[in-house]
Amino acid sequence: MEMRESGIAEEYRIAIVDDPQQVDAAQWDALLHAQDEPTPFMRHDYLAAMQVSDSAVNDTGWSPRLLTLWQGDRLAGAVALYLKSHSYGEYVFDWAWADAYRRHGLHYYPKLLCASPFTPVPGSRLLARDEATRRALARAITALAREGGLSSAHVLFIDEADRRAFEAEGWMIRHGVQFHWRRDAAAPCADFDAMLQQLQRHKRKNIAQERRKVAEAAVSFSVLEGPQIAESDWDFFYRCYTLTYHAHGSSPYLTRGFFREMAQRMPEHWVMFVASREGRRIAASLVAVDSARGLAWGRYWGCTEHVPCLHFEACYYQPLAWCIARGFQRFEGGAQGEHKMARGLLPAPTASAHWLADSRFADAVAEFLAREGQGVEAYVDELRERNPFKADATSSSSQSPR
């Protein structure tokens, strides 16, 4: 495939495939691990599992288009793209943009998307051997969208290197916020209780009350790491996972087959917290980890019966205690959720990049993003004024950009 507008075909051989398994896994992962912010969610195995499990495929509105740049037999650049027929499972919301197109008699879908499906985790998206190749990937995405007659292209939850490349290529940047816990390297907490002591008194009191409700309900937790998670544990977790979606009147994004693939391909990246009461399991949360880098991400949870505050215990307190005990550097709580702040997770900026083909809509969206960005900045400033940590623990609670 040629991309005449991008001018990159002179330097690279361009290949676009619709199946991750058509790209050499070792070269893909080597390129990923050379980036500033690699995550397990961009690993070749993770993306392949999304497809072979029928989770992110044509029938679910995710049509894979892996764009690769080659120099000889060497993979110089790669990016995981999808043609999307909707905006579900993205966590950067553009429904209003799609509606504006519809009201003007234009088609917003299909659009071109770069993301880890159903995974709102910031990290490197443009997998490139150097800055020149990173810029070339940004141009290639633009050219692919333009030559395909698509309305737009979007790259979600990018890192700083990606942001610089997209800005240099004229893309619009959208800002957001998540809530993360970070270890204070200068004065690390010895355990979860030590972290609680750094919180303001009323925050500690609220957490103690929440944990007491779970304890008084005779709920205990077991922690299963990687290969310790048996098939029956995955089955129970998946039941809990689906119940969470059904409780909100929706269907789960991921199939049971996806988690089976994870157990086979990437077991070392998962930790499961299982809640039990009176000898029966009643809830489970699943946390993704990168032990080599000391990073953890809260991902999924569900329960078979209601216990007050069990969600907080399973999704925040148990994983945080586990991370602190192992000297992890960061725990990310997922998309949105200001309530996480009261539990020691503080605001952290996120960014996404966007390109729209129609200049009229691009101008309107640029104005909107400028206003929205100011609002996000003011919101983060307000949040930081409500820091849940004590004044003498500000170093422990500081949250610098990624």
Image (spheres, helix red, strand yellow):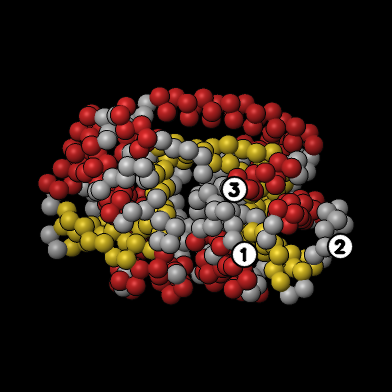
Give the distance between the C-alpha atoms of the residues marked 3 and 1, in whole angstroms. Answer: 16 Å
Q: Which residue carries the number 1 mark?
A: 31
Give the distance between the C-alpha atoms of the residues marked 3 and 2, in whole angstroms. Answer: 27 Å
Q: Which residue carries the number 2 mark?
A: 10
The three-letter code of the residue at mark 1 reads Leu
For disc 3, the neighbor class at 10 Å (few under 14, some 14 to 19, many from 20) is: many
Position in image of residue 239 (x %, y %): 34, 62
Q: Which of marks 3 and 1 is nearer the N terminus?
A: 1
Instruction: Please give the name of the residue rendered at 77% of the width and 69% of the height, measured from the top-left corner.
Output: 71
Does the image show residue 84? no
For disc 2, the neighbor class at 10 Å (few under 14, some 14 to 19, many from 20) is: few
The three-letter code of the residue at mark 3 reads Ile
* Residue 199 vertical placement versus 260 (above, below): above
Q: In which quarter of the image is the N terminus?
A: bottom right
Choose between 315 and 332: the one closer to the eye. 332
Position in image of residue 384 (x %, y %): 42, 28
Q: Which residue carries the number 3 mark?
A: 158
Q: Earlier in the sequence, mark 1 or mark 2?
A: 2
Q: Quadrant of residue 18?
A: bottom right
Give the distance between the C-alpha atoms of the residues marked 1 and 2, in whole angstroms. Answer: 21 Å
Q: Which of marks 3 and 2 is in front?
A: 2
Q: Do the residues labelled 3 and 2 touch (CB within 8 Å)?
A: no
